[in-house]
Image (cartoon, grey):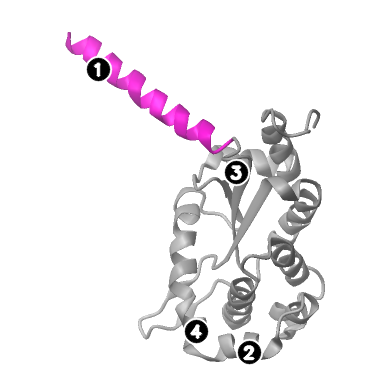
C-alpha cells in the first residue's frame, strides 16, 4: 500500500509539472506573453532584439512583449543601485524603465524603442542620449522628469520584482520566458532555435491562427 501511495504521489507530481510546462508553451486567450530581462551593457541583448523585431513584425497580433531593464542590479548598503556594467548601465536602464512606462499600452513603440537602444550607437548606454525616446515620439521633458525625480525611483521596485523569477530560474541575461512561467529548458530551446521559430511552433499548434508552417 505504501509503495502504491508513493507511486500515485509521483504520478500526480509529474502531471502537475507537465501541465505547468505545457501551459507556458501555448497561447493564452490567443496570445503569448513574453517577458524579457535585459541590462544595457550586455553584449548578448542586441542579438535577441533582432529576433524580437522579427517576431513582432510577423506575429504582432499574437504576442505581448514585456521588457525588464534590470538585469543583475543590486542595491547597496546606502540604497544606491549597483549595476553589472557600471554607472552607464544604471543610467541607461533607468532611461529604459522610464521610456517603457511612458509608452505603456503602445507595444509597437515599445518594441521600436528597445530595438533602437540595443542598436549601434547604443544611444543611452554609450552616448548618454535620449535619442531613442525622441525617435519613438516621447516627450523628452516627460522622460527627463522621470529620470530626475522620485517618479523614476518608484519604478525600481516593480521592475526588480518582475525580474526575480527569470533570474532565479534562468539566471542569464537576457532571459526570456512565456506566460509567466520561467523554464530553463524552454530558454535553451530559444537560444538554440531562435525566438521566431519557437513562437511560430506554438502558434502553429493553435487552430485559430493562420500559421501552418515554420
Point out which mark residue 144 bears: 2
Quick one: SS at disc 2? helix
Q: Residue at left 53%, top 74%?
A: 83
Are the residues tagged 1 and 4 within 8 Å (C-beta)? no
Point out which mark residue 187 bears: 3
The residue that disc 4 covers is: 151
Point out which mark residue 22 bears: none
Residue 2 left/right relative to 187: left
Q: Pick whichever, 48 or 130, lies toward us.
A: 130
* Residue stretch in magenta: 1-25
Mark 4 crowd level (few <14, some 14–19, many ≥20, 10 Å Cα): few
Are the residues tagged 2 and 4 within 8 Å (C-beta)? no
Q: Residue at left 47%, top 75%?
A: 156
**Mark 3 or mark 4, which is nearer to you?**
4
Quick one: SS at disc 1? helix
Mark 3 crowd level (few <14, some 14–19, many ≥20, 10 Å Cα): some
Tell me the CA gap for discs 2 and 3.
Answer: 35 Å
Residue 161, position in %: x, y?
Answer: 43, 63
Residue 173, position in %: x, y?
Answer: 59, 58
Tell me the CA gap for discs 1 and 4.
Answer: 53 Å
Point out which mark residue 6 bears: 1
Q: Pick whichever, 62 or 171, lies toward us.
A: 62
Amino acid at each position: 500500500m505504501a509503495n502504491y501511495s508513493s507511486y500515485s504521489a509521483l504520478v500526480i507530481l509529474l502531471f502537475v509539472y507537465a501541465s505547468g510546462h505545457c501551459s507556458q508553451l501555448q497561447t493564452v486567450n490567443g496570445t503569448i506573453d513574453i517577458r524579457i530581462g535585459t541590462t544595457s551593457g550586455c553584449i548578448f541583448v542586441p542579438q535577441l532584439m533582432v529576433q524580437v523585431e522579427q517576431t513582432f513584425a510577423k506575429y504582432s497580433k499574437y504576442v505581448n512583449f514585456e521588457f525588464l531593464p534590470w538585469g543583475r542590479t543590486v542595491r547597496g548598503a546606502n540604497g544606491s543601485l549597483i549595476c553589472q556594467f557600471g554607472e552607464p548601465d544604471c543610467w541607461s536602464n533607468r532611461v529604459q524603465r522610464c521610456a517603457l512606462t511612458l509608452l505603456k499600452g503602445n507595444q509597437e513603440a515599445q518594441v521600436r524603442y528597445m530595438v533602437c537602444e540595443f542598436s549601434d550607437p547604443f544611444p543611452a548606454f554609450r552616448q548618454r542620449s535620449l535619442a531613442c525616446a525622441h525617435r519613438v515620439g516621447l516627450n523628452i521633458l516627460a522622460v527627463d522628469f522621470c529620470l530626475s525625480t522620485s517618479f523614476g525611483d518608484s519604478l525600481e521596485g516593480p521592475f526588480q520584482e518582475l525580474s526575480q523569477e527569470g533570474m532565479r530560474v534562468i539566471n542569464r541575461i537576457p532571459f526570456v520566458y512565456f506566460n509567466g512561467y520561467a523554464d530553463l529548458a524552454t530558454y535553451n530551446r530559444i537560444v538554440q532555435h531562435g525566438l521566431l521559430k519557437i513562437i511560430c511552433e506554438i502558434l502553429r499548434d493553435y487552430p485559430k491562427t493562420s500559421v501552418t508552417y515554420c
